[in-house]
Image: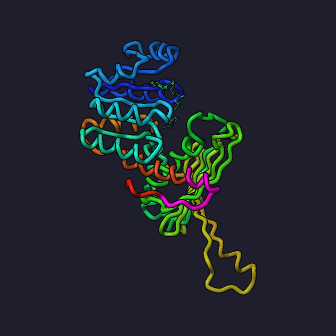
Amino acid sequence: MIKIAVAGCGYWGPNIIRSFHSLQNCHVQMVCDLSKERLNHMKKLYPSTKTTSSYEDLLKDEEIDAIAIATPVRFHYTMARESLLAGKHTFVEKPMATNGEECRELIEIAADKKLALMVGHTFIYSSAVMKIKEIIDSRDLGDLLYISSRRCNLGLCQQDINVAWDLAPHDISIILHTLNQMPVSINCQGKAHVNKKIEDITNMTLNFSNGGFATIQSSWLDPNKVREMTFVGSKRMLVYNDIESMEKIKIYDKRIETPPHYDTFADFQYSYHYGDSYCPYIKQQEPLLVEAAHFLDCITNGQTPHSSGKEALEVVQILEAASRSLQNGGGQVFVDSKYA
Ligand SMILES: NC(=O)c1ccc[n+]([C@@H]2O[C@H](COP(=O)([O-])OP(=O)(O)OC[C@H]3O[C@@H](n4cnc5c(N)ncnc54)[C@H](O)[C@@H]3O)[C@@H](O)[C@H]2O)c1
């Protein structure tokens, strides 16, 4: 039985608590938040779980094997560092820290102490993303030409990070997971409307060494909730709409073929290939539950998490490059690989 504690019971923390609570080989020993109101609410839901407003209580409780951190991003590094130094396996929400140096230090401490360090790149644990990776790896789409991703909604505006740091970790982690390569450079433009210091809309481009590229639009200022990614291949195209409940992935047998020769414009039209479209079967399972179970497996078996410190660092390196690009009006910034 793994005893876990969760710090942060705001919007997302309760989902993490619920997930660990529902797993057989785990007991949620203690939860922590600065808000008494949130703690009272958690106590009503989970009477056998202790509550505290002091993070110190989690660190010094020798029965606790692991700590999951779901506080605002500016606290991630300090809390994760303290957790690892206290000998606890550590799960940190995305993004793992505010810069590459902090990520590197957490990776080193976890390695020294032989502790699991995992980041909440939740989407890589979703059946849809697993299926997309399988399809791309099988080369069913042909050569991947580009990826276009949009993640938009109205709010929840954060106070300490811009929309790219808040929403794009999902898109970036999916892109890195499916392509299995890091971009060489980033361009990012954005605008701050609601809070004049924090961008609420950003457009990021990831440039890969093989000429491929991916674009990510992130917005807290959109009337519609959009979670859509398009993967355009030389043979087929795939659209992943995470808002759909059942048919999240649609594959289009569409492409442009250059005809060997053509005499008229009408002939040229035939170079567009329109085939069938279909939705592959996807197992219905909650990604967060799979993620939580994987963290427990990694603790038990000593295996490296699929979203380990390394993957967390890669996402943060891209976000850092995006921030530098934002500051110079969208110019190209090379991804700093000195920590890789
Ligand atoms: N993986 C996902 O899909 C996903 C989704 C949403 C949010 N998140 C991540 O979860 C984290 C939390 O986001 P949120 O939207 O729940 O934020 P939130 O502001 O709603 O909640 C944060 C909570 O942390 C508490 N807190 C702050 N400092 C603390 C401290 N020192 N000790 C204990 N508690 C403290 C606050 O009182 C608050 O209740 C962020 O890193 C965010 O990026 C992940």
What coloring was used for the rendering?
rainbow
Question: Magenta segment range?
Answer: 323-335
Q: Is residue 218 left or right of residue 124?
A: right
Q: The N terminus appears in which quarter of the rendering?
A: top left
Residue 10 higher or lower than 302, as above or below: above
Compare residues 230 and 38 and report the one nearer the observer.
38
Residue 225, visible in the rendered structure: no
Residue 7: give x, y in percent of width and height. Answer: 42, 26
Percent x, y of residue 85: 29, 33
Of the pair 244 and 221, the residue shown nearer to us = 221
- In percent of width and height, residue 309 lies at 36, 45
Left or right, 121 with reference to 205: left
**Does the magenta-highlighted stretch encompass residue 328?**
yes
247 sits to left or right of 24: right
Q: Is residue 25 magenta?
A: no
- State the count of labels: 0
Q: Residue at x 65, y 42 (%)?
A: 200
Name the quarter where the C terminus is drawn: bottom left
Above or below 284: residue 328 = below
Asked whether the viewer can see residue 152, the reply is: yes
Give whichever of 188, 242 is nearer the camera.
188
Residue 162 in percent (x, y) is at 59, 41
Which residue lies most toward the right here?
A: 265
Image point (41%, 58%), residue name: 337
Which residue shows up at 63% across the image and 70% down it? 273
Q: Is residue 56 above or below residue 96?
A: above
